[in-house]
Image (cartoon, grey):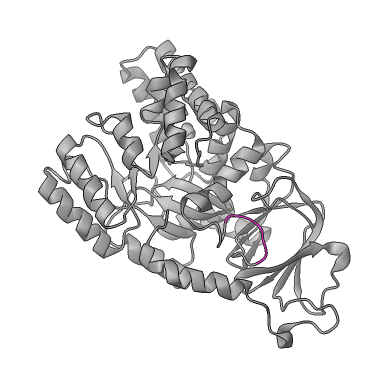
Amino acid sequence: MTTRRRHLPALIFLFIAACSPIPPGQQDPENRLPQATLAITNVQIIPVSQPGLLQDQTLLINGRHIVKIAPASEVTLPAGIRTLDGRGRYLIPGLVDMHEHLPRGDAAGEYPLDRYFDLQLAAGVTTIRTMRGQKGDPELRDAIASGEIEGPRLIVGSPGFNDELAPDPRSARALVHQYEREGFDFIKILDPLGQSTFSEIIATAKELDMPIAGHLPDSISPDQALAAYWTLEHLHGHGSARLAGQQAFVPVALATAESGVWICPTLGFQVSWYGQASIEEMSRWPGMAYAAPGSLAYWTERVNRQITESELSPSENRARMQARYAAVLELANAGVGILVSASGGWFLVPGFSIFVEFRCLDRAGLSPGQILQAATYDAARALGKEESWGSIQEGMLADLVLLDADPLQDIRNAEAVRAVIREGVLYERDELDRRLAKVR
């Protein structure tokens, strides 16, 4: 999938330029090293695009790109180069959250946009896909890409289509054309949405080469969604199908794998929605120290109200959550692409919510390696960017996270962020802490 086809030539040029041989004048005459602005030394590298761990490596960055990876014993650094000591630490690609909501100022305790971006950065999230579009989002994306605004790379979805936004096929077709002109990366589907309007959206988006992502409206069958969607959110259709039992779910999982649709489970959001963690437990979730003022009381009230007003019994809510955990593991085992998708919601602090999702995917039975791959390389693959970022290889954009412990041993070690690099710009722990102090 390509987020915007018209941007491909520029991205291809950047990648070719990054991978082209470095002119002799830019080589260190003694060590034949490429020119570099930053070296991460003696670090354990988890490339993700290939299994395992590269022990005791030195990685060189020049500008925005990784230009050299080699055993530390083979690299003698030139004098004066900036270094980051990776001894005893682990380097992973920058994290990607494939289901986020930019703050719009219409919810209790929301952060200003710059603080929202600081939270994402502090958690090592270097790319987010936004699922709650509004006018101006493509310009924000482009301003970040140009360096005018500091923030994670953005993939921007359109405003969500439902019967209110698009009451008939004609208006739906016009809106798809409008959102394509305005530069949105994909079309977002919500519920409710009529069958004829849905069909017109799908047909028009296909004409314009715009991917479809979002919910499964009640009027639309899972087979229709699998034939049309790029990503399906919240396990819509899959959670209820898994309630029928493991054997009944096998053909659903196989059909999903055959379709090539990527799944964004948003498990952390659903844990709070189905009342499957206590207020006390959720209050200890990663990042809660940085929850916006007033949000804790608001979230507590909403969770209690949701549980009280639910038409389902506690055992039914528990069964639905267990079915979602089981569905994720069985979809992954069937070869379905799972993407890390924190979503946002009650007790989910931006950026740090990706760690809640990691814990939930671990609870579902995915290995640490699978979770890391879903949050990095697979996200890049889903976006058609795996030749630009999403793994640690020479020539890639330098989106990196330095960790104090090995996440392949325990995925919670991904929470021990020591430094973040976003397209070659280094943010060490003291700078991340300074930004977090402003959020409190």
In depth, the one of 273 and 128 nearer the eye is: 128
In the image, residue 393 lies in the stretch drawn in magenta: yes
- State the image coordinates of residue 32 (x, y, percent, origin top left): 80, 78
Q: On the rendered structure, is 384 left or right of 159? A: right
Instruction: Give the tally of numbered discs.
Output: 0
- State the image coordinates of residue 183 (x, y, percent, origin top left): 31, 63
User: Furthest-right residue in view?
Assistant: 73
In depth, the one of 387 and 413 nearer the eye is: 387
**Res. 362 image quadrant:** top right
User: Furthest-bottom residue in view?
Assistant: 25
Q: On the rendered structure, is 106 left or right of 162? A: right
In depth, the one of 155 and 176 nearer the eye is: 176
Residue at 60% over, 60% down: 399
Query: Can the viewer see residue 28 in this picture?
Result: yes
Residue at 41% over, 69% down: 143
Q: Which residues are magenta?
A: 390-394
In the image, residue 251 lies in the stretch drawn in magenta: no
Q: On the rendered structure, is 53 left or right of 160? A: right
- State the image coordinates of residue 376 (x, y, percent, origin top left): 57, 50
Residue at 53% over, 40% down: 288
- State the image coordinates of residue 292 (x, y, percent, origin top left): 45, 46
Q: Is residue 292 above or below residue 359?
A: below
